[in-house]
Image (cartoon, rainbow, N blue to C red):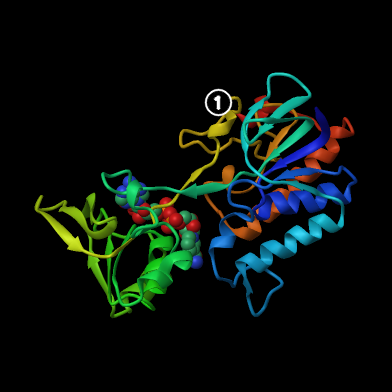
Amino acid sequence: MAHHKVMILGTGPAGLTAAIYAARANLEPLVVEGNEPGGQLTLTTEVENFPGFPDGILGPNLMENLRSQATRFGARFQDGWVTSVDLSRQPFTVTVNETETHETDTIIVSTGASAKLLEIPGESDMIGHGVSTCATCDGFFFRNKRIVVVGGGDSAMEEATYLTRFASELTIVHRRDTLRASKVMQDRARQNEKIRWALDTSPISVKSQNNQVHGLEVRDNKTGEIRIIETEGLFVSIGHRPNTEFLGGQLQLDPVGYILTHPRNSATSVKGVFACGDVMDPHYRQAVTAAGSGCRAAMDVEKYLEGAFVHDWSMALG
Ligand code: NAP
């Protein structure tokens, strides 16, 4: 069985920054790509707020740059995703693609978060046939078609505004009458004449025929009235869920499933396992904060392997 000093699980900005730092510290990290190599930024277009790029940079290009930078210093990459880990004894074992097992002294978990679905009848069957969670990936397929975006947060406003480039008409469906989105994002959407609003409205089911979406059944939460909004496209933009299932309950998580880390460092409840990026951050979720946390995790690993890291989890729980 291959033995490593550190394995990094995931290749978003957190994992790749951890890989750059760990590789520069001569730890020869093995980085497991995950099922979405490059993470969520590969699903976006222009990234305008990553420091150092005054004219912006395309998400996939930024990730490619980070990957080349990590490779340059000796990080190794492995295809596939982690199906399970055994954290009960050291060295830990990490199983990739259900079959390949690795041994490692430390782990950096940077598996990120994935888009949530509404979990209503008809939805999951229609992914790729009218249902999408990524406007920048799929918007183009809905040129001159009707689109519904579900959600009331910044992502929903951003995606809806973007999708008006393609849509013949676009409706935002949100379950409450007030939006969660920041004022600037709300204002931008409200000023867009192509956007219609269905507030206080909950999705009930996705209607389809011949393997194509043709409507979203919704309930007006004030009157109880049920109706169908005719649409060819349904973009679900209701937030993300951390990718922590493969941990099998071996790390302490918050009630939603985010990994709990020490407030002053990146340690988790298990000595030798560190976490960074969206998998432990329900709040900021930015590429730059993820990258910063990846740097912290790699520096913590380096110290841990030198025997100089103090793991005081009791203090973490305060
Ligand atoms: P979010 O802020 O958690 O908003 C999720 C939205 O989906 C909420 O309006 C929520 O409704 C709704 N929702 C959740 N579950 C639902 C369900 N089962 N059925 C119907 N509606 C449901 O998530 P987000 O918009 O993805 O944003 C995540 C973070 O990224 C935020 O911190 C945000 O500020 C940030 N972000 C920033 C930008 C930007 O500044 N450019 C762009 C995108 C995201 P309720 O409001 O009723 O809970």
- The residue located at (55%, 54%) in the rendering is 284
Which quadrant holds residue 72? bottom right
Across and down, in percent, residue 19 comes to 77, 49
Give the quadrant of the C terminus: top right
Residue 263 falls left or right of residue 229: right
Residue 136 falls left or right of residue 111: left
Give the quadrant of the N terminus: top right
Cβ of mark 1 under 8 A from ligand 1: no
Label 1, secondary structure: give it.
Answer: loop
Residue that mark 1 sits on:
249
Any part of residue 40 in sight: yes
User: Residue 185 versus residue 170: which sits nearer the camera?
Assistant: 170
- The residue located at (58%, 51%) in the rendering is 36
User: Residue 304 versus residue 11: which sits nearer the camera?
Assistant: 11
Q: Is residue 159 above or below residue 119?
A: below
Across and down, in percent, residue 127 comes to 38, 53
